[in-house]
Amino acid sequence: MNAAASDARTIVRLDRVSKEYDEVVAVDDLDLAFAEGDFVTFLGPSGCGKTTTLRMLGGFEMPTRGKIILDGEDVTRMPPNRRDVNMVFQDYALFPHMNVERNIAFGLELKGQTRDQMKARIDTLTEFLGLSELRDRMPDQLSGGQRQRVALARALAPDPKLLLLDEPLGALDAKLRGQVQVELKGIQQRTGKTFVFVTHDQEEALTMSDRIIVMNAGRIEQDGSPQALYHHPQSRFVADFIGDTNLLDCTVLGVGGDRLALDWHGFTLHAAAPDRMPEDKATAGVAIRPESIACAEQAEALPAHLDNKLRGQIRHRIFKGARVVLDIAIHDNPAGDAVLRVALDPITAAAIAGPELWIGWHNTQMAVLRD
Amino acid sequence: MTAQTRAFLSVAYWAFVFYLFVPLFLMITMGFKDSKFIGFPIEAWTLQWYLQVFQDGEVITVFLFSMAIALSSTFFSLFIGTWVACFIGPRSFRGKLLVFAVTCLPAVIPGIISAISLRIFIQLLNVEPGMGAIIFGHTIHNVPFVTLVVMARLSAQPKSQIEAARDLGADELIAFLRVTLPYLRPALIGAGVFCMLLSFDDFVRSFFLGGYEPTLPVLIFAMLRSGMSPEINAISTVVLVLTAVLGLWAERSMRRMPAAT
C-alpha cells in the first residue's frame, strides 16, 4: 500500500512559509511538497523550527508569510478543527476522564458518525493496534507504550489526510523505543497514510523515514533519503549531526576527470567531483564515515581499487560491542594532528595486531561539503 | 529535632485540639440534657430538644430557606467564578495583575462594609431585601474563592489536551465543555462545597440584606436574644454534623480524582 513511487501525488505543499515571533525567525522561507504515503521526518536540534513547522501544518500556529496547501486546498488560515490533519502529541494528551474507547471515539463523534460507524472503526483500530483488551481502561492505567498506541489510534480514527507526530517516542525507554520505531513504520506502511514525524534523534529518523528533512536555524540543511543523508551529507552540519564522521579540512588541488584532488596535511586525497563545484573554491570540507575505511596490515592486502591509501599507527582502540573503533594517527605528519577514526567489525579488528597499519578508501566514499 | 522540641510542639498541638473540641463537645452534650438550664451537673438525658427541632415548622422552613440560598448562590458563584478564571487564566495581558486584584477584593473586604454597601445599592435599585438580595450578596463574596481554585487547576491542565480536542474537530466551546470542564471537576466540587458552607454560615450579609424571612444563623441569633435554650444546641449539632459530612465528602472526592496525565 505504500505509495512511495515517484509519481505519487502531492498531498501537502508548503509554499514559501515563514514564521516569525517578535524578532526571532523560527521558520525561514520553507518550500516543500510531500508525496502521499511517504514517511517524512523533520530532523534537527531543538529550536531549529521543526516543531513550529509541524504545528503550522496542524493549524496551531499561523505562518507569518506563505501558504499551506493541503490536497489542493489552501488551509493556511484554517483552524485545526476544520483541517483533515491529526496529530500525535509529545505527551500524548489523552483525555484523562475518558477511557480508551471514548478517547478514540472523540474525533468520530465530532465528525457526526453514527453509533454503528464508530463501533466498526474503533473495532478495526483497536485490533490493528493491539488495544482490544484495553478499551475500558482509563489513561492512568496504561503504560507509556500503550498510551502512545491509544494516541495513535485516536489520531488515525477520523482518517486524516496527514498524520503529524511530535516526538512521540521521547517519553519511552530506549529498548521500547527501538521496538516502537519498527511498529510505527509498519503501521504507516499498512495504512498508506502520509506521516510527518518530528524528532531530534537521528537514529529514529534513519530507521523509519522514506525522506528526512534536516533543519537548522529555521532553514533546510538537506532533504533526501536516509541513505543519501548518511553517505552523502552536503553540509558540515548534516555530516556532524547524523552519525559518527571524520571531517577533513582540505585544500583544493584541482579537478581531474571525475575526481577532485585535495591536499590534507600534505597528503593527496581523491574525492568524487561534486556536480557543482565552485571554480574559485580553494578549500573544501570533506566527510568520510569511519566504517567506509578499510584496514590492513600490508598495503597490498587492501583492495586494489581503493584510490586513497595512507599508513598510520593505532593511537586508541575502543571497544563498542558490535564495532571496534580505532583512532589512527597518520604517518609522516610531523604535527601529529592528522587523525582518522575507523570502525571495524570485531573479527577484522582482531586480525589487525597493529600498531602499524594501512588504511584505504574509494573516492566515491568521500562527500565534499558545501560549506 | 530533639525530644524536647518534639514534646513542646506536641503540647502546642494538643492544646489547640483541646481548645477546638471542648466547646463543641459541651455544646453537643448540653443538647441532650433533660433541663432547660444549661450547665453541669447533668442529671437526666433526653432527645426531646431534637424532637422539638424536627417538629418546629419554623426551624424546618428556615433551614430549607438557607439551603435554597446556599445552593443558588453556589451555582451563580461557580458559573461566574469559572468564567472569570477562564478570562484571567491562560493568556497574559496588560493589567492582568490589576484585574486579578479586583477579582479577589470581595474576599477581603470586611463583611460589614460589603453588607452595608450592598444594602444601599439594592435600595437605589429599588430591589426589596430578601432572598434575591442575599443570594446576590453571597455570590459576590464567593466568586473570588471559585476563581482562585479554578485558576490553579486550569494552570495545571496541559495545553496539549485542549489542542488535541481542537485537532480532533472540536471548536473552542466544545473543547471547553468536553475536555476542560471535566478536568476542572474536582476544583468545582471543592469550591462549590466551600461556597455552600460560606453561604450557609454567613450572618452579616444575610442580616443586612434579608427581609422578614430569616436565614438559619439569623434565626439562631434571634432565639439567643430571648434566652439560651437547649433547642439551639440541638439545631447547632445537626448543622455541625451535616457540614462536617459535606466537607469530608468534598475532600474525599477531590483526592480520588485522577491526577493530570
Image: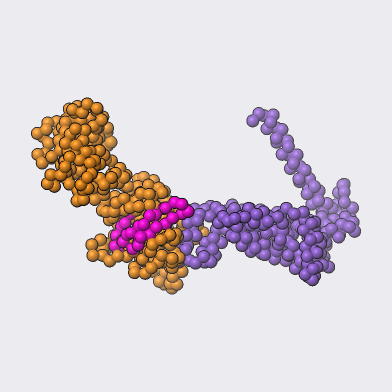
Chain colours: A orange, B purple
Residue A270, located in which quarter of the rendered image? Answer: top left
Looking at the picture, how far across and down is residue A121, in whole percent? 38, 67
Identify which residue is drawn at 83% across, 68% down: B212
Q: Residue at x 73, y 37 (%)?
A: B12
Residue A104 falls in image quadrant: bottom left
Residue B165 drawn above or below residue B30: below
Relative side of B126 to A10, left or right: right
Q: Is residue A311 left or right of residue A3?
A: left
Tell me if residue A72 can be seen: yes
Residue A122 in the image, given as x and y percentages of width and height: 40, 65
Whether residue A39 appears in magenta in the rendering, the answer is yes
Name the residue at 29% across, 51% down: A222
Residue A354 visible within the image: no
Q: Nearer the viewer, residue B218 or A80?
A: A80
Image label count: 0
Magenta span: chief secondary structure: strand
Q: Quadrant of residue B254?
A: bottom right
Residue toward you, B201 or B84: B84
**Which residue is more in the foreground, B50 or A211?**
A211
Q: Residue A358: x, y in percent? A: 15, 32
Residue A231 position, x and y percent, is: 23, 47
Q: Is residue B191 above or below residue B19?
A: below
- Is residue B100 one of those drawn in magenta? no
Look at the image and tell me in which quarter the N terminus of chain B lies.
Answer: top right
**For this view, does B181 lie left or right of residue A158?**
right
- Name the outermost residue toward the front: A280
- Magenta residues, as a range? A13-41
Residue at the (74%, 42%) spot, across then down? B17
